[in-house]
Amino acid sequence: MTTVEAPASHLRENPYEIAKQQLRKVAQTFAIDDNLVNVLQECKKAVVVSVPVSMDDGATRVFEGYRVTHNIARGPSKGGIRYHVDVTLDEVKALAMWMTWKCALSGIPFGGAKGGIVCSPKQMSEGELQRMTRRFTSEIINEIGPERDIPAPDVGTDGRVMAWIFDTYSMNKGHSVLGVVTGKPLTIGGSLGREEATARGALYCVREAVRKKQMSLAGTRVAVQGFGNVGSYLARFLTEDGATVVAVSDSTSGLHNSNGVDVAAAIAHKRETGTLEGFRGADAISNDDLLLLECDVLAPCALEQVITEDNASQVKAKIIVEGANGPVTPMADDILEDKGCLVLPDILANAGGVVVSYFEWVQGLQEYFWKEAEVNAKLNDIVTRAFNETWAVQRVAEPTTTRGIYP
Ligand code: NAD
C-alpha cells in the first residue's frame, strides 16, 4: 500500500481572523463605533451543504459546499464560487467580507458573498463537474437569485460553470433568469469584457500607481504569480502597455526570462496543454523565488497568504498589485510599508471583476447589451475614481495616526 501525503494547504493563518483584524484596524483609524464593528465582523448567513455526485467510475462521492453572505446593507450580495481542495468555511467567510468592502469602494449596489466546494476540479471529468455544480445549485437555490445573491467565477470555476448554474436555476424557475449569475458565456447573456475585467481593473490601478510614483510602464519589469483568468490577462495587458514581464507561474511551474517572457506564446501553450510546464524560451523558477525577483511590479494573482512575515523583507518590487484576494498577510503588509513598497490592496486592485459583473447584471435585467468599449470606459471611470479616493484617504489617515489624538 502506498500512502500519498496530502498537499499542504495554502492557508497558513485563518483568513477570517485576518479579515476581522483588518476591519478592526480600519475601525480604529477612523474611530468607528465598537458596536458597529461587532456586527460588521460577522457574516449574516453561512450555508453548508453536502453535494452527492455520481462519479464516472460508478461511485458516489459527497462534496462539501458553502455559500456565505457577509452583508446586504447596500444591495443583494455578490461573490464568486471557488472550486479548490483547500477551501474552508472560514476562507469563504473572509472572501465574503472582502467582497462587501470591494463593492462599497467601487460604489456598486451590492453586499458581499462567496461560495466554494472542497474538490479538485482538475482531477474531475466535465460530466462530474457539471453534476456537482447542478446539485450544488439545487442545494442553494433558495439562497441565490438576481435580487438576493449573485454568484460569479473564482479560482477553479469559469463561464462554463456559470452556464450550468444559470441553466439549473432557470429550469427550476421555468424561465431564463439572466441576473442570477455573472461571468456567463456571451451566448447566454454574458457581458463583453467580463472575462478580462479583473485584470483590466488591475491594469488601470497599476497605471495610476506608476503615475503617482512618477515612473513609466514602458520598460517596467513585472513578475506575475498565477496564470489563470486574472494573471494571464494581466500579464498580457501589461506587455501591451510596454512593460517587460520577466516571470510568470502557475501551480505546476514557473518561467523566468530577464529579457521578457513571450506572454502571448505562454498563453497559447497553457491553452493547448493546460499548464505552463514544457514551455520553451524561459528558465524554470519556483513560485517562492518568483516573489523575490528583482522587479518593479509584483502581481500575486493566485491564492492567499503568499507574502508573509517570512519573505516580505526579501521582496524587491516597488509596487505589489494584489490580483488575488488576500495574498499579503497583515504582518507582511507592515514590513512592506516600512520598506516603502506600495501595496495596491485586493479590494481595489481586483475589483474590476465585480464591477463588470455588476454591468452584466444590469444588462441582463434590462436585456440590453453594451459594446465592449463602453464596458471598458465605464470600468476605467470607476476603478480610477476608487483608486484616487483610496489615495486621498491614505494621505489623510497616515498623518492622523502618526500625530495621534490630542490631548
Ligand atoms: P483561476 O483558477 O483562473 O487561476 C488561478 C491560477 O493560480 C492558476 O494559474 C493556478 O495554476 C494558479 N495557482 C494555484 N495555486 C497556485 C500556487 N500555489 N502557486 C502559484 N500559482 C497557483 O483563478 P482566477 O479567477 O484567476 O483567480 C485568481 C485570484 O484572483 C483568486 O485569489 C481570486 O479570488 C482572485 N479574483 C478573481 C476574480 C475573477 O474575476 N476571476 C475577481 C477578483 C479576484
Image: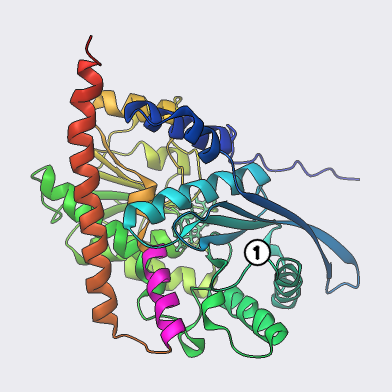
Query: For the C terminus, which image quadrant?
Result: top left
Residue under the image location 40 percent in, 77 percent down:
362
Residue under the image location 36 percent in, 56 percent down:
282
On whether residue 251 falls in the magenta region, the answer is no
The boundaries of the magenta stretch are 353-366
Identify the main secondary structure in magenta. Answer: helix
Residue under the image location 69 percent in, 90 percent down:
174
Pick out the residue farthest to the left: 214
Q: Is residue 85 left or right of residue 256?
A: right
Depicted 215 relative to depicted 373: above or below: above
Residue under the image location 70 percent in, 63 percent down:
123
Residue 244 seen:
no
On whether residue 365 falls in the magenta region, the answer is yes
Q: Is residue 133 left or right of residue 198?
A: right
Q: Quarter of the image holding residue 402?
A: top left
- The secondary structure type at the circle numbered 1 is helix
Q: Which residue is mark 1?
A: 122
